[in-house]
Amino acid sequence: MLIRSAPGRGRSPLIVTAAVSAALLVAACSSPTKPTPIPPTEAPSITCPLDVAVQSADGNPVAVQYTKPTVSGGSAPVAVTCTPASDTLFPVGASTISCAATDALGRSAVCGFSVRITRTPRLRVSKFMAFGDSMTYGVIALNAPLFRLVSLPGSYPARLESLLVARYTAQTIVVLNEGLGGETTDDGRRRLPGVLSTDRPDVVLLMEGANDVNQNHDLAVDLVAGNMRTMISEAGGAGSLVYLATLPPQIPGGARAGSPESVPLVNARLASLAVETGAVLVDIYAAFGDGAGLIGPDGLHPTEAGYQKIAETFYDAIVKTLEEPTTMSAIVRRR
């Protein structure tokens, strides 16, 4: 049986159901969806460059460029600032650079490093003259007295010049070799005035007396001291500073080691002479110790390592006494 709704009594159930479904669909479509949260960025981090070291040739401030810090993280844009800025003039001494990274959210990270300006080392003088016998000239004994090698590039004056040139790059340093094989201090006393007149050195490096010891043994003490005193006076009169060296040890049993026991006696007198005359004492004997590896098979002449040790000992004395002071007055030894 077909049932019809009476007119004016409401909507058809089918129509009502459709209307409700439509309304629910509209409501569902118009309901706002919740956005997926964006994870916050990490705060910025900053890493400064390594410390910077620069030399000033004349002691005046130097413009220094340095690498920018490395930055990671943070909300863009991230601003990076360093104070003082790169290319600033930095004075001699140590300056601290402070850097900061600040992101768009106002979060900051900081780091720091230093710029160190040192004055290029300088000596008060630049011309040296080494005076002495075969140990100044550069004789190396190989096996016996008849087998000797002369090596001027390997002599202590040449090695000393290399050390000084490497450190004092803003100056022209010269070390003249006026060694003469077989010379005694009496011979040297007579030869020195002419050499001083020709070379006109700022500094005289005196190391002589081994031949006197071999010829006169203990009697060489007074002879060497008297002649060396005269040579110190001659050099001083010519306007030269004097660096007076003790003699290296002799190794007993060597073919040319004429009097090992007399060497310490002569050296003790030379040390006293340096005090009396104002010469700078350069203690080669102490630097050699027992002489192992530093004295050749003849018991007298240094090996190549021995000549290097002599050069280094003179070098240390020169740096200590003749280097111009700076605001950062520390003696930098050889490397």
Image (cartoon, rainbow, N blue to C red):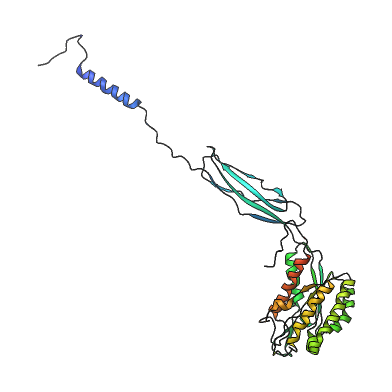
Question: Could you say which is closer to the camera, residue 222 or residue 122?
Answer: 222
Residue lying at 57% horizontally and 43% vertically, measured from the top left: 101
Picture coordinates of residue 182 (x, y %)?
81, 86
Up-down: is 229 above or below 119?
A: below
Q: Nearer the viewer, residue 289 or 206?
A: 289
**Snapshot quadrant of residue 316:** bottom right
Question: For residue 285, which quarter of the picture?
Answer: bottom right
Residue 289 seen in the current view: yes
- In this picture, is 3 found above or below 331? above
Q: Is residue 207 above or below residue 98?
A: below
Q: Nearer the viewer, residue 317 or 24?
A: 317
* Residue 64 spot, x, y in % from top left: 69, 51
In the picture as drawn, the residue positioned furthest to the top comes out as 8
Q: Residue at x 84, y 79 (%)?
A: 228
Displayed quadrant of residue 24 = top left
Estimate the x, y position of residue 34 in percent, counting from the top left.
38, 32
Extreme residue in the left direction: 1
User: From the image, which quarter does the N terminus lie in?
Assistant: top left
Q: Nearer the viewer, residue 270 or 143?
A: 270
- Residue 251: image location, x then y, percent: 70, 86
Is residue 177 something that shows in the picture? no
In the picture provided, is 124 more to the left or to the right than 102?
A: right
Image quadrant occupied by the C terminus: bottom right
Residue at the (71%, 77%) spot, across then down: 286
